[in-house]
Amino acid sequence: MIINFDLLGKPIFPNVKNLRIPYMGSKNKIALRLFEKMLEIKPNTKYFFDLFGGGGAMSFTALQLGLKVHYNEKQKGLIDLIKYILTAKKGKYGIFPDDFYKFITREEFKLLKNKDSLKGQFARICYSFGNNQRTYLFGDIERAKHLAHNIVMFQCKKSLEEFNKLLECNITISNLLSWNERRIEFMSQVKDRKYHELQHPLQLQQLERLEHLEHLEHLERLPTFTTSNLDYQNVIIDTPIDKTIVYLDPPYRGTADYIESALHNEIDNYFINSPYPCFMSEYNAPHKSILEIEKLKLLNNSKETKSVAIEKLFYNNK
């Protein structure tokens, strides 16, 4: 795919799908704005190296823009998850083994979250609070979430009866074919005015995240997409300098810890000394900022106290 530019030198993008693994710090909502700026500066780019790949929003956007992409992620479970999705065949419920579609309880999450396995990574992605991959998604409403999951996924009448009794409501089972359509129908029922107090507590976040994972099958296996499971400094970059963008999205300074921590002085040195054009996403860094984007802090759900963060894109001027 050839990227065209308008008269002002800004790239004109095709329709791009929102493809990502749900992940803390995901760039899915601002990926196109970041690429617009990077490609405005480097319009001849053909290769994109994503050194802190995370949820893959930048890599999957780059693929759809026609770039050759190398996704690197130190967390092996994410690499294995992506490889599985790109080669998976659909089963009864979707692309994952049937038992993945059963609700994961708090106790099961405790056992799975430290496992280096496909299901362990699945649990960390779909059932962790704020996608932090450490703490369980649900609090004291876990039982209601479990019942709602069974109603949507398995059309379970016994769960429906207990759910309606527990919450004193009159939800019905949907006959729609796919579980995602049933999820949407379920949410339309709880958004009814008489069930308004149920709306926020009963959002089925685990199924929303699962749906994002299922969407990645649209990528299929592409020769223009390669992966590695390395420290960012050990990724071999040997493509032409004038046709390459290196992108760094490390855990941000002074924010919540990710599974993998970061040594920011080392990252800064890499960024400055690389012979390649490097761009870095951060809130603050001792480099040249070329773009600022306002973002709501998503982990704060109080309407009265929602705050705005300034997401910055830095450039090493190479």
Image: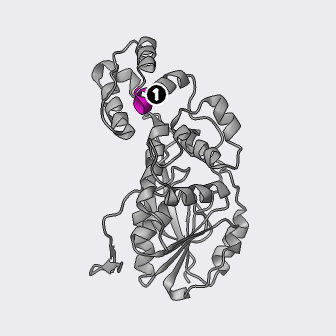
Q: What residue do we see at 67% from left, 41% from top?
A: 113
Image quarter hosting the N terminus: bottom left
Image quarter hosting the C terminus: bottom right
Q: Residues within 10 Å of mark 1 (few under 14, many from 20)?
A: some
For this rendering, which residue is in front, 162 or 259? Answer: 162
Indicate whether residue 151 is drawn in magenta: yes
Q: What residue do we see at 48% from left, 66% from top?
A: 221
Give the residue at mark 1. 150
The magenta stretch spans which residues?
148-155
The reply, left or right, for residue 247 in relation to residue 181 is right
Q: Position of residue 75 (x, y in %)?
A: 66, 57
Q: Position of residue 192 (x, y in %)?
A: 29, 24
Which amino acid is tagged 1? Answer: Asn
The reply, left or right, for residue 194 in relation to residue 51 is left
Give the prevailing secondary structure in the magenta stretch: helix
Q: Is residue 265 visible?
A: yes
Indicate whether residue 109 is drawn in magenta: no
Q: Position of residue 154 (x, y in %)?
A: 43, 30
Vertical arrangement, residue 97 with respect to residue 277, above or below: above
For this rendering, which residue is in front, 265 or 113? Answer: 113
Q: Quadrant of residue 199?
A: top left
Total tally of numbered discs in the picture: 1
Q: Is residue 34 visible?
A: no
Q: What residue do we see at 46% from left, 67% from top?
A: 291
